[in-house]
Image: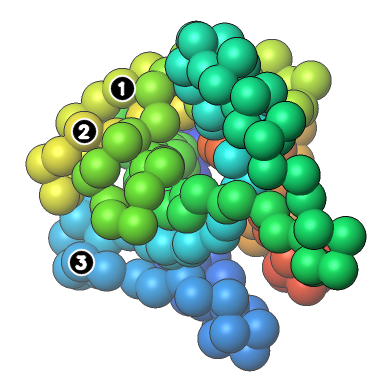
Amino acid sequence: MDGPGTVTWEEFVENAGKFLAVSDKLSDGWEFRGDKDIPGQAYLVRKTVCFLPDDSIWRNDEAADDNDGDIEEFHARFQEDPHEAPSVAETPFITEHHILWSMSYSVPVLFFNGWKSDYPGVNPVSVNEAQTVHSSKLNYTELSQAIHPIVGTPFLQLHPCLSRELLRGMPDSKNKLVSWLSCVASAALNLKIHPEYYKLTC
C-alpha cells in the first residue's frame, strides 16, 4: 500500500541502513535482524539494561504499605552510621525495542518489552505500567499487547494506525523512519534517541 503517509519496504530498508550506520558510529547497540530480501521479515532491535531505584514507579505500593511498620521499626533499631557512605537499593530493568515494517499499513511499527529483572521474560512490564511512563503529550495511546509477527512472542505494541497521519506531516524528511521514531519513542518506555540520528532527516 503506497501513497501519502506511507513507507515502502525498500524505503524502510534504506532508512534502516542509514540509521544503523549512525548507531555503529555511536556504539548505540542497534542491529538489523532477519531477511531483508523478504518484505516485512527483518527488523531493527536494541536491548538495554539500566538500574532503577527501588522507590521508583515500579515498586509494589501495596507491599510497601504493608511493610511500613516493619521499616520504621528497622530504622528505629538500626540507625544509619554517619561514617558510612549512603547506598541506594536498585532494581535491574531490561528493555528491548523492535522496529518493524507493517505490511498492512505500509508504515514502521514499534514493538517493545520491559522486564524488572536480571533476566528477560521474568517480571514483565504490563500495558498499564508502560502507560505510566508515557511522558509525551502526543495522542498516541493505542498501546496493547500483541504477538510479534516475526519472533512469535508477546510484546507491547504501539498500533500503526496513527503512523500514517504522523508521516503525512513530514513529507520533506530525508529519513522518514527517524522522523517517525522521534514522534513515538517516548511512548515506548521513554526510548531515547540520540540527537545525531536527527541529522539523517535533513
Q: Are marks 3 and 1 in contact (CB under 8 Å)?
A: no
Where is mark 3, residue-wise?
A: 34
Query: Number of marks in the image?
Result: 3
**Residue closest to the eye, 192 or 17:** 192
Answer with the quarter of the image where residue 26 lies. Answer: bottom right
Return the disc, 3 or 2, that comes first in the chain's sequence.
Answer: 3
- Which dot marks residue 145? 1
Whether residue 34 sits left or right of residue 144 in the image: it is: left
- Give the image location of residue 152, x and y in percent: 11, 41
Q: Of the residues shown, which amino acid type is indicated by label 1?
A: Gln
Where is mark 2, residue-wise?
A: 154
- Number of the front mark, 3 or 2: 2
Instruction: Give the Cα distance between marks 3 and 2.
Output: 18 Å
Q: Residue furthest left?
A: 152
Q: Of the residues shown, which amino acid type is indicated by label 3?
A: Gly
Residue at the image point whose x is 68% and y is 23% from the top: 72
Q: Residue furthest right?
A: 82
- Give the image location of residue 185, x and y in percent: 63, 42
